[in-house]
Amino acid sequence: MKFEISRRGLLQTGALAAVAGFVPTRFAIGNTAKVKVGLMLPYSGTYAGLGEAIVNGFKQAMAEGGGKLGGREVEYVPLDDESNPGKAPENANKLVSGDKVDFLVGTVHSGVAMGMVKVVGESGTIMVIPNAGANAATGAMCVPNVFRTSFSNWQSTWPMGKVAIDRGMRKVVTITWKYAAGAEMVGSFVESYTKLGGTVIQQIEVPFPNDEFQAYLTQIAAAKPDGVFTFFAGAGALKFVKDYAAAGLNSVQLMGPGFLTDGVLAGQGAAAEGILTTLHYADALDTPANKAFRAGYKAAYNKEADVYAVQGFDAAQVIMKGMAAVKGDASARPDLIAAMEKAEIVSPRGKFTFSKAHNPIQDIYLRQVKGGKEVVLGVAHAALADPAKGCKAV
Ligand code: BEZ
């Protein structure tokens, strides 16, 4: 509904306000408007499934929480970022300056997220990252108005170095897409693995989002490693695992961050058997919060939830907590940020709090595919905090 206020009405309101000593605040007026939430995510390409799961998880948490933010209706503004870092500043600006979103939620791809962080670093818009692990987002580029409900790339793979050594892998090959996420996840693994005495005999980089792996698999077979560490996700991960098995490499232990199998395990089928992964979530976590979340997701979308849905769910949770604390006043940014910083999130992954740089401090699970299911072998590293290298702003 549109409010038409006549000049006479305005004068009367002014007179009334003067008599009553009441001055309507910006918030009192703005409170009638919907809260705008920008959902800048990949809705096409190799990461489309991840974007969809994040939106589903976000909307599930909103629906379960009553559908409003601080008592206000919500308007979603979706934008397909195409996992294209080159378009990230322009796309983020469209939402921040054009649509004037109150919150920017995004994204999946580390390179795109870094472009978004630059934009909100200038505008002050509160941004919640529901996946992208770019270390800099809660490291060198950190700003008080950016939160992450997922992981840092460093965090997701650091514990795997010890796992590989403990399992007798003395020489490994790494293979990943050539962009920030791959470089940082491999970098973190290599650092922890070599510190413990492991040797990396070859590092292979594949242009993003290429999924023609045959030539690289031939190189891996020739190198005869004890294990292969890899980061691929979404449709690329689905294909890599199938191609790896088809190349007859399943006798060489395949390992990586859990993105290698999460959300795509059913499609990978028998090819995924035995894969070892570390991640801050596992479908099989036997907690009331995880069971309720998974049941709610299945009921709403007729699909199994995955880690991306969890991260979207928790992005909504932290925004809901912030907006409840400021009673819907999205313009009260310092108070909103303070409330979000203090939030303890009861996540399907387990409870977590935020580090000073606004990254989750969380358990990293060790998982293995057995009989077509992701089995939790244990906690590879409890309450792991990202080192937030270079973060000075918070
Ligand atoms: C990233 O680009 O940060 C990313 C993409 C997919 C899965 C995990 C991380």
Image: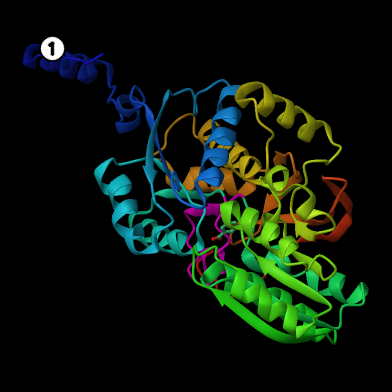
Q: Would you say residue 211 is visible in this rendering?
A: yes
Q: For this view, does 142 lie left or right of residue 226?
A: left
Q: Position of residue 281 (x, y in %)?
A: 75, 48
* Quarter of the image where the N terminus is located: top left
Vertically, is 248 above or below 8? below
Q: Position of residue 32 (x, y in %)?
A: 34, 22
The majority secondary structure of the magenta stretch comes to loop
Q: Disc 1 beta carbon < 8 A from ligand 1? A: no
What segment is highlighted magenta in the picture? 131-149
In the shown orientation, is residue 48 left or right of residue 37?
right
Which residue is drawn at the image coordinates 72% and 67% (left, top)?
Answer: 247
Q: Is residue 276 above or below residue 294?
A: below
For label 1, the residue is: 9
What residue is rendered at 86% in x and 83% in y? 170
Residue type pointed to by label 1: Gly
In front: 26, or 191?
A: 191
Examine the rendering and report whether any part of residue 388 can be seen.
Answer: no
Q: Quadrant of residue 175?
A: bottom right
Q: Quadrant of the C terminus?
A: bottom right
- Vertical comparison of 128 with 5: above or below: below
Depth check: give the residue in front, 74 or 188.
188
Regarding mark 1 in the picture, which secondary structure is present there? helix
Quadrant of the displayed image that contains ligand 1: bottom right
Q: Residues within 10 Å of mark 1 (few under 14, many from 20)?
A: few
